[in-house]
Image (cartoon, rainbow, N blue to C red):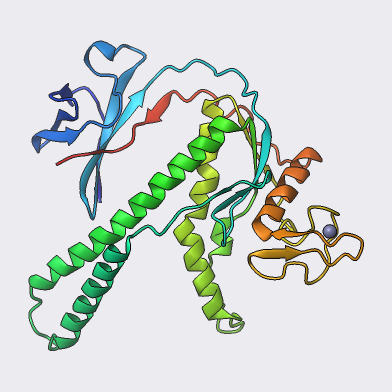
């Protein structure tokens, strides 16, 4: 659910406190919001740097306002950092070709998970006890809202982690190489069609869920604009084989990938073994160094004029 305010003219943004601001929302009036970012307002505003609109978005945790701002940014100097390959994996969320990994804990604490389970059970029980045709009670909605709130909290923590890690990567490395995966294909339903039913449906459903949880796509799209802002480059290399090929000898031998986590080269002259995601990341970087990068859209988003400001919590 969202409402767009196409013009920034009448927003009349005022900072009332270090952490709070006021904004005029058409048909609603003055609304207080949490000030989380530098906004070109008041003395900071100019013809080049100004708010051009806003968007109100509602999620399970309340309403948020995202300001559209137009800013003039100087073209960054080329990033002098080293190049790195990234494998976005299942067992390790992000593995780099230099052996580093970025990991995270559970998005919800044990207590929060227990609470979520408890609420879900309560919601299911209420549904079971409802007689068919009976009037829907308002009371379960409170439970549903709390369930949605906890899930939204987990999602926000995941997003926060993704932003922090991708920013760190873009800051550290000059060239970031990723696989040109089409995630939408990978998370497609494993069920198949009536004529061609899918195989290993349950396992794939589990995998799909964990891919979505890692929000794989965003981990690849975020570095794209973050590297560009810092004068770096995001390069994409063709994906096929990167997880099955040995990064030490370059041969693809059947059965090398022992499991999701472990890679053991079956080439008798090599025998390299290591983390499977790390192996993938090294292959990705190797493909880039071989000159196999797919050409990124020319000069796109090097200077980002309109930057979307991170949503501020409005209460
Ligand atoms: Zn090998």
Percent across and percent down for residue 120 are: 25, 74
Q: Residue at x 33, y 36 (%)?
A: 310
Query: In the figure, is residue 6 to the left or right of 107?
Result: left
Please determine whether, in this image, residue 148 is positioned above or below residue 201: above
Picture quadrant where residue 31 is located: top left
Please determine whether, in this image, residue 290 is positioned above or below residue 157: above
Residue 190 seen in this snapshot: no
Query: In the figure, is residue 43 to the left or right of 85?
Result: left
Percent across and percent down for residue 84 are: 67, 39
Please determine whether, in this image, residue 81 is positioned above or below residue 282: above
Q: Residue at x 26, y 60 (%)?
A: 150
In what quadrant does ligand 1 lie?
bottom right
Percent across and percent down for residue 270 are: 87, 59
Q: Residue at x 61, y 27 (%)?
A: 299
Q: Residue furthest right?
A: 269
Percent across and percent down for residue 141 are: 14, 68
Picture quadrant where residue 236 is located: top right
Task: Give the total number of marks visible in the rendering.
Answer: 0
Q: Quadrant of the C terminus?
A: top left
Residue 153 seen in this snapshot: yes
Seen from the viewer's position, the closer of residues 215 and 83 is 83
Please determine whether, in this image, residue 138 is positioned above or below residue 315: below
Q: Residue at x 39, y 45 (%)?
A: 160
């Amino acid at each position: 659910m969202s409402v767009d305010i196409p013009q920034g003219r009448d927003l009349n943004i005022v900072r009332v406190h270090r952490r709070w601001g006021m904004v005029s929302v058409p048909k609603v009036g003055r609304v207080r919001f949490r000030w989380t970012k530098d906004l070109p307002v008041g003395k900071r505003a100019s013809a080049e740097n100004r708010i051009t609109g806003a968007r109100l978005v509602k999620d399970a945790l309340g309403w948020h306002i995202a300001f559209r701002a137009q800013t003039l940014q100087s073209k960054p100097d080329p990033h002098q950092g080293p190049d790195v390959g990234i494998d976005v994996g299942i067992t390790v969320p992000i593995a780099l070709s230099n052996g580093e990994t970025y990991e995270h804990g559970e998005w919800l604490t044990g207590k929060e998970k227990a609470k979520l389970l408890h609420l879900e059970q309560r919601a299911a029980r209420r549904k079971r006890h409802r007689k068919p045709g009976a009037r829907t009670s308002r009371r379960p909605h409170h439970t549903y809202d709390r369930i949605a709130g906890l899930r939204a909290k987990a999602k926000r923590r995941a997003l926060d982690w993704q932003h922090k890690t991708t920013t760190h990567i873009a800051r550290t490395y000059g060239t970031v190489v990723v696989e040109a995966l089409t995630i939408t294909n990978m998370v497609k339903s494993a069920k198949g069609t009536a004529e061609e039913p899918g195989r290993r449906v349950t396992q794939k459903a589990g995998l799909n869920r964990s891919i979505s949880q890692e929000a794989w796509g965003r981990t690849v799209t975020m570095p794209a604009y973050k590297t560009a802002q810092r004068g770096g480059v995001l390069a994409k290399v063709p994906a096929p084989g990167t997880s099955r090929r040995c990064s030490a000898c370059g041969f693809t031998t059947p059965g090398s990938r022992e499991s999701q986590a472990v890679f053991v080269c079956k080439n008798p002259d090599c025998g390299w073994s290591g983390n499977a995601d790390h192996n993938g990341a090294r292959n990705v970087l190797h493909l880039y160094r071989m000159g196999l990068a797919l050409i990124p859209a020319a000069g796109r988003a090097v200077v980002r004029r309109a930057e979307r400001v991170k949503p501020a919590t409005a209460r």
